[in-house]
Amino acid sequence: LVRILAPRVGEMRLAMAGVVLYVCGMPLIAVAEGIGLACVGLACCAVGGGAFIPCASAIASKQASHGERGAVMGTYQVGASLARAFVPLISGTLYAALGPGAPFFAGAAVTAPAAWLVWRAARAQPKAR
């Protein structure tokens, strides 16, 4: 789907829409009392993450100069790997201390600045969409 949408709407716009969907989905999961709202929140997170993650990787690659691309992509991948390693530990602690909605609210709060980063990248390269 990203391969079809990115050329039409642009990677920047698709990444921004993905972040917004993801950030909106997390609180929906947190407050869901039934399966319906939980599924809506999960769908927002799935579609948002599916749009954002490949576009963010492409944007990071394109923002780097030819000589820096390997270092930039390596740093990008290290950050993602560290998040996958430590977020479950942090989320479990939040769940135990504050309740089942806490990890989702925290996830939304931590992810929201990614929208600013995409906006900043778009401003740095006005011809890129």
Image: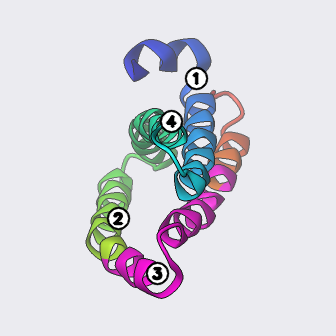
Name above or below for residue 64 compared with residue 108: above
Badge 3 vs badge 1, beta-carbon distance below 8 Å: no
Q: Please state the horizontal and vertical placement of residue 29, each as a whole percent of the image.
A: 52, 51
Query: Marks 2/3: CA distance?
Result: 27 Å
Whichever of labels 1 and 4 marks the residue nearer the N terminus, that label is 1
| Quadrant location, the C terminus | top right
Name above or below for residue 67 compared with residue 129: below
> Disc 1 or disc 4, which is closer to the eye?
4
What type of secondary structure mainly makes up the magenta span? Answer: helix
Whichever of labels 2 and 3 marks the residue nearer the N terminus, that label is 2
Badge 1 vs badge 4, beta-carbon distance below 8 Å: no
Badge 2 vs badge 4, beta-carbon distance below 8 Å: no
From the image, tell me which residue sits under label 1: 10
Whichever of labels 3 and 4 marks the residue nearer the N terminus, that label is 4
From the image, tell me which residue sits under label 2: 75
Q: Secondary structure at mark 4?
A: helix
Q: Is residue 116 left or right of residue 73?
A: right
Identify residue type, mark 3.
Answer: Leu
Identify residue type, mark 1.
Answer: Gly
Identify residue type, mark 2.
Answer: Thr
Query: Marks 3/4: CA distance?
Result: 24 Å
- Find the magenta span and give its range: 89-116
Count of all numbered marks drawn on residues in the image: 4
| Rendered residue at 26%/72% (across/down) | 85
> Disc 2 or disc 3, which is closer to the eye?
3
From the image, tell me which residue sits under label 3: 94
Q: Please state the horizontal and vertical placement of residue 81, each as a whole percent of the image.
A: 27, 65
